[in-house]
Amino acid sequence: MADQTELHQKNLEKIFSPQSVAIIGANKKKGTVPFDILHGILMGEFNGLILPVSPGKTHIAGIKAYKYVTDIEDPVDLGVIVFPSTVAHMALEQCGQKGIRSVIIISAGFREVGEKGVTREQQLLDIARKYDISFIGPNCLGVINTDPKVRLNASFARKMPAAGHIGFLSQSGALCTAVLDYAEAKGIGFSKFVSFGNKADITEVDLLYYLMRDEQTNVILLYLEEVSDGRALMEAARDVIRQSGKPVLAIKSGRTREGAAAAASHTGSLAGSDEICEAAFQQAGIIRCGNIEEMFHIATALSYMPVPNSNRVAIITNAGGPGVLATDAAIKEGLELAAFSEETARKLKKALPNTANINNPVDLIGDATADRYESAMEAVFQDENVGGVFVILTPQSMTDIDAIARQVAQAAKQYDKPVYASFMGEASVASGIRILQENQIPHYSLPESMSHVFAVAHRFGRLLERKKENAVEPVVPGKTKGGAILQQAMGEGKSYLQEYEAVQLLKEYGFPVWEGQIAVSADDAGHLARKVGFPAALKIQSEDILHKVDVGGVQLGVQTEEEARSAYDAIISSVRSHVPQAAIQGVYITRQIPRGEEVILGMKRDPSFGPVILFGLGGTFVEVFRDIQFRVAPLSRTEALEMVQQTKAYKLLAGTRGRPPKDLEGIVDALQRLSQLALGHPEIRELDINPLIVLDEGKGCFVADVKVFLAEPSSTPEHHEFYI
Amino acid sequence: MADQTELHQKNLEKIFSPQSVAIIGANKKKGTVPFDILHGILMGEFNGLILPVSPGKTHIAGIKAYKYVTDIEDPVDLGVIVFPSTVAHMALEQCGQKGIRSVIIISAGFREVGEKGVTREQQLLDIARKYDISFIGPNCLGVINTDPKVRLNASFARKMPAAGHIGFLSQSGALCTAVLDYAEAKGIGFSKFVSFGNKADITEVDLLYYLMRDEQTNVILLYLEEVSDGRALMEAARDVIRQSGKPVLAIKSGRTREGAAAAASHTGSLAGSDEICEAAFQQAGIIRCGNIEEMFHIATALSYMPVPNSNRVAIITNAGGPGVLATDAAIKEGLELAAFSEETARKLKKALPNTANINNPVDLIGDATADRYESAMEAVFQDENVGGVFVILTPQSMTDIDAIARQVAQAAKQYDKPVYASFMGEASVASGIRILQENQIPHYSLPESMSHVFAVAHRFGRLLERKKENAVEPVVPGKTKGGAILQQAMGEGKSYLQEYEAVQLLKEYGFPVWEGQIAVSADDAGHLARKVGFPAALKIQSEDILHKVDVGGVQLGVQTEEEARSAYDAIISSVRSHVPQAAIQGVYITRQIPRGEEVILGMKRDPSFGPVILFGLGGTFVEVFRDIQFRVAPLSRTEALEMVQQTKAYKLLAGTRGRPPKDLEGIVDALQRLSQLALGHPEIRELDINPLIVLDEGKGCFVADVKVFLAEPSSTPEHHEFYI
């Protein structure tokens, strides 16, 4: 697999930067895909040799055509297959024979059309493996490389986009046409632009690694309808961010059940759980965007401007109202208004008229011209308290819009801090916005967008710092024993562990458990209760009983030997009457865990992302409000802490209104141990610690109940999602 | 006051539709406000007589000028004052002498510049009252009426906007310039456009009533930085919606503390609590918008299209990816994808190619041309299950963008259902979007916006229906007694009521209270406890003690006479040791209320909106999560129920996961009684019922504790916000 990855990276070089391209299946019919592809490469002014292959033509668009790709005498770096799906495999076979290793398969009619297509797609893969070919597609729009040394538009996009530093990767071809059209209007350029379609061979993961090394690219965008290998995607994004510092932005559609159904019907993909996807993206540092506009809002800011080193912004405006709206928006996004230094205040006072407001937001008043903007920007940019500058303009009668746009561009060049602009209105500010775009100043028509993007950019900056600091943060505190218990249970064909077995397993992994023992008579119960200590808890143990409370199988708060004996008898008699046929192993006796905050820890396996850890506060928060957090294992200490902090009920653990804070360290430790256990033992299908009792800070926490479900069960009493 | 309101309505006629306008303070200097105003009226092709008044000029812009307004021989309908603030009052005085009753004061330099300005503003008001003048401003951009019969641009906006049916009212002048510029680019027209500035005389409330009657206006937009009379605004909005069915949209800035501070620094206004404003707008049916773009998104949909009669949409697209994004967005906004009838499915199957998806979202596939859009629209528009249609287009190589735009316009004319469009991209779809705009088809570049607007429009439609049904919904179930208790307490100079007084007051208003009696000895306590019934609750009564629990003044769960006697002694001895100087009236004994869900009801008075009612679920929900709802009194039954349902913790009351539902009717009744009590007794400054114990459905609820604070207290033990 590592070899395959290396091969793809090598072959991708010639997919993006070939010296010669064969268009296999080219024809002369305008308005068809084969024609558009050839036309695109020609019009894009490709810096290499173009070789049409067409069984019936001797020349196309004035260029000599070949019957078969194998007829070409010159070496061919890249094959672009535009034949119908029914014959595409033959073209690929001939590419192999000709020694072409880099291929783009534009043709549709594969996995997306059902069973027959799946077979055809497999055929392509088999041929690719035989010849060490790597291919993009099938069912895609193609590939664009704007690098002036190459200029390859091997796609049926209407025209070549401008050169820039944004790399765009998309699973949907149709969306690409809208994106190119949007980008053209906004003056946004691309380094590489890839529609990867069915990603039968080369996937978004391969492309991420390629763009990581691509010098033209400084921001990577991804549109996905389906995550096939979630763990690989996370690893790739982490590598990209850590090794290159390039941000990765992604849209993952199909968020709702209905959206996922719509996606399935048009790509044949299977959507996973969106909340797990959300968590995984966050962990990997992928910036998830809700739509194309948000994606380019963020991408332009990160591509054009330095990352802000603080969340304190200065707002400069020529109108009070919009200044208020921008302030509201900034605060809502978690930004702060920078408090200016005395020197800045002095400078502003000197440069601005008396009626101006020299506090933040700085109001230059309606008659402000470019020089007033210049003085204000100079003052605030030089202020150490300012992390970034928002320049707002409304078109009033004295406003010299274009000159102010040029002043903003000038300031951006001069200072190493981000500046974003919002020229409000549309018709009369259009030329000013164009000047901003030409000078790569991020522009937003709404203060909300401006603040949102700044907040995202600031968080990304902090992530980069953290990645540097914590590059080697130890992930696993737990041990790796416990196999024996699981092996025995699996060997016996069990589908879940008995409580005493589960407790033993957790103990071996260093979880805070209070071990107990199994009593088989009332007297036995009395003795054992004294041994474990009072108050004691008694619970039925039976292979046939999963939910103990429901059958009267639990007695808590037992204070004396005498009570323990009665409790034993009460349990046995209740269970006998509820489940007469149950085989009873005995009654498990532990010391009862003191009262504390109850939290839930869980683990299940996601088909795309593997073992996933769940955390939530017990009771109504999880049951009624579904206030839960997911993370993909393994969990770093920081990730484990964050997942606790990101529940809404975290306030209750942190200590508010006179409540003492709870033992967060204990929860974090347990979460990391659970993550380790999940990774070490794929034979565990699902695990629920419910509840973990958390005491006050420094006093630890204790597992009060645990259920462990095993893989490939021979007899499952019930199917379980997370036990909440 | 009613007279004043009538006068304003009468005078507004000539502010908007004068036959002659005097520009008082006009001059020839380009780039100044006085010149711009005259220029604006001239260029706007005003259909009446223009009369410049300028002390030093005999003619301006070729038009005869007068030294004083009193020199004009012709009758003058409207005076527009552009003189500096220091002499504006003289101009207004002369308007009065000339018999002008309708005035616009553009001049700045009043309340917004501090104390001197406040005095000058009062001077204007005094003159206006003397002569029965009504004026807009000061410190405003002016007034525009696009009606072809009038064509008045009495503003310094750069140019006259297109005629349309949207009325726009703004407190900020600078924002107006941005709005006009935005609207021009989007092809949006206005009926009336008003910048009302400091609203010293005519306010947004007067303007709302004017636009309610204005035949050119079908949607009213409002930008506010300050709500001075919240109750009047609510009443006006309710009248507008009920009497004319016109939607009222509002932006209220200064949402955050920092934003409010910024607003205060530039308008001198005092911002009230934003969450109360939010609640009040919702109650009045005002659609609150976050920004200008959202406001026009909604305004165009409501102005151009019928209100949807269901939330079930049909999505038609030529690309799968955007169809998925649109589906996600629709579901998130609470819309549903319409399930097509069999007939629709048959029609779609017949009209579309095999590869198309004939389910919702309907995917016409990338090569779709206008005829395919036409067939699909025809089929889904005729389907009774469809409440509205979203048409999505991506610019692919075969896409005939303009023709499809015309098809959409055609369909919109033919069917009485809303259709919104999203032509994705920007550059190459621009001409298509222009066709949509010309034909008044709401267009959104993002599926999110489209879905959000549809959801808002649908909710507005339901509001209109409800207004019709519940026009006479009785607001008040409570009685109006209780005055005696309050009068006596006020007379004694008390700042709050003793519990037994408060309970008596609530009882008279029909609240579910369990009355008790005051014991003055241990034996007395024993007898009374038997009388009220066990278990009993005992609580200290003292003018000097507000928080009874803190001083050991409460004993609960008392089961026998003997226990009651001990409890009495325990309370007295604890209170004596904690507060030796306290004057003790006795110990209040009631039967103890059974366990149930604890909720909090509260009332306080807002300076702008008057008595406001609060509701929240007790415990952590209110304390930690601030999960509370506000409503302005009076509360209709529907409003009271909604405020309970809109808390996040409502699920706990509604009954989930096997819990029985709680007695909602009891809560709603108590909320309405509280609202009635607040309106009937302004001498109550604040009232907290904490908790109200709610039993299972049908079993009622009971006031467990109540605090009543009185107005103008002679001795307040502590200042209280809501007691949470």
Image (cartoon, coloured by chain):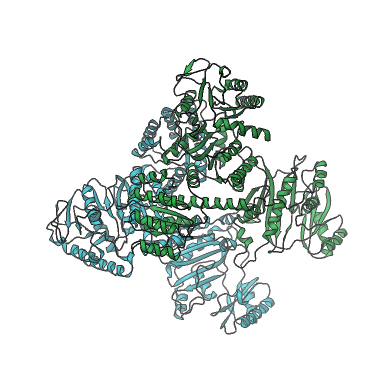
Chain colours: A green, B cyan
What x and y, as percent, mark residue B479? 46, 67
Viewer-closest of A158 and B657: A158
What x and y, as percent, mark residue A663? 68, 61
Residue A367 in which image quadrant: bottom left
Side (left or right) of B301 relative to A114: left
Above/below status of B15 relative to A530:
above
Side (left or right) of A551 relative to A131: right
Q: Can the viewer see residue B517 in this picture?
A: yes
Q: What residue is shown at x 22% (from left), y 51% (from top)?
A: B39
Q: Can the viewer see residue B237 in this picture?
A: no
- The N terminus of chain A lies in quadrant: top right
Residue A574 in which image quadrant: bottom right
Query: Residue reaching furthest left?
Result: B73
Residue A136 in which image quadrant: top right
Viewer-closest of B524 and B5: B5
Q: What residue is shown at x 43% (from left), y 57% (from top)?
A: A315
- Number of marks in picture: 0
Query: Residue reaching furthest bottom?
Result: B581
What x and y, as percent, mark residue B170? 34, 55
Viewer-closest of B493 and A229: A229
What x and y, as percent, mark residue A414? 44, 52
Side (left or right) of B125 relative to B561: left
Above/below status of B535 relative to A683:
below
Viewer-closest of A319 and A705: A319
